[in-house]
Image: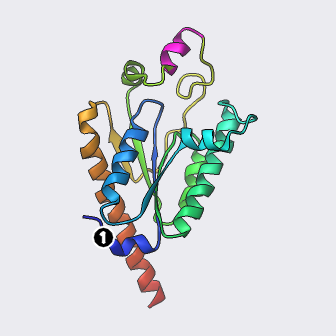
Amino acid sequence: MVDRTLSSQGQVIWITGLSGAGKTSIAGRVVEQLRAGTTAILLDGDVVRQIVADPNTGHDAESRLVNARRICRMAQVLAAQGLTVVVATMSLFREIHAWNRRNLPGYFEVYLKVDLEVLRARDPKGLYSRSNCGDEGHLVGVDIPYEEPLHPDLVIGNNGSADDIAEIAARIVVAAQGVAAREQKNGMRRAG
């Protein structure tokens, strides 16, 4: 059960990993579980890219950084309104993670770590197979280096099956609520 007292201050749960790691599926389940007791919203990196529809923002490293910064700021605005924001995005730059820690309330970073062989086998968007054929460039983890998070709050090896998604989501919810509760308690101590 979600602690309703935490929803008043907002929180950002940031789920990162390479393409095919399960970010969107797991984030969707996290939002479903959180909605039992708080107002939660999902920000998916691909969806934000579609909504913004900036023709100048491609998939090269520089464009990915621009898109990541947009997502950070959207999460900041939504969390400031008391929402729990669950972000599913690659966010391949450590500078993004560092900015998030400094600027996002109740920031909780989850790194979905998956072996490259598993990602290639899953390949839900066909990116790895197109990359193998030379039809896909700018693939993170293959063409563009992925800067693994240095200090994630939770690392989850997601080499398993889709059956594990609900259990992984539950682990994230419990751990993120613990961080939010500690942050709220520390805030009350400073205020008192």
**Image quadrant for the N terminus?**
bottom left
Residue at x-position 30% and y-position 61%: 36
Residue that carries the numbered disc 1 in the rendered image: 3
Prevailing SS of the magenta stretch: helix
Residue 149 locus on image (x, y percent): 49, 44
Residue at x-position 55% and y-position 57%: 75
**Left or right, 135 with reference to 113:** right
Q: Is residue 110 visible?
A: yes
Farthest residue, direction bottom: 192
**Left or right, 99 with reference to 19:** right
**Left or right, 17 with reference to 54:** left
Specify whether residue 100 is painted magenta: no
**Left or right, 31 with reference to 56:** left
How many numbered marks are there?
1
Residue at x-position 32% and y-position 37%: 157
Residue at x-position 44% and y-position 91%: 192
Specify whether residue 130 is painted magenta: yes
Front residue (pair 135, 16): 135
The amino acid on which the numbered mark 1 sits, given as a three-letter code, is: Asp
Q: Considering only vertical position in the picture, is 11 above or below 189?
A: above
Where does the magenta region start and end? 127-134
Q: Is residue 91 visible?
A: no
Label 1, secondary structure: give it: loop
Residue 115 locus on image (x, y percent): 38, 27
Q: Considering only vertical position in the picture, is 113 above or below 1?
A: above
Task: Give the class, few, some or many, for how many residues have Cα within 10 Å of label 1's Cα (few <14, many ≥20).
Answer: some
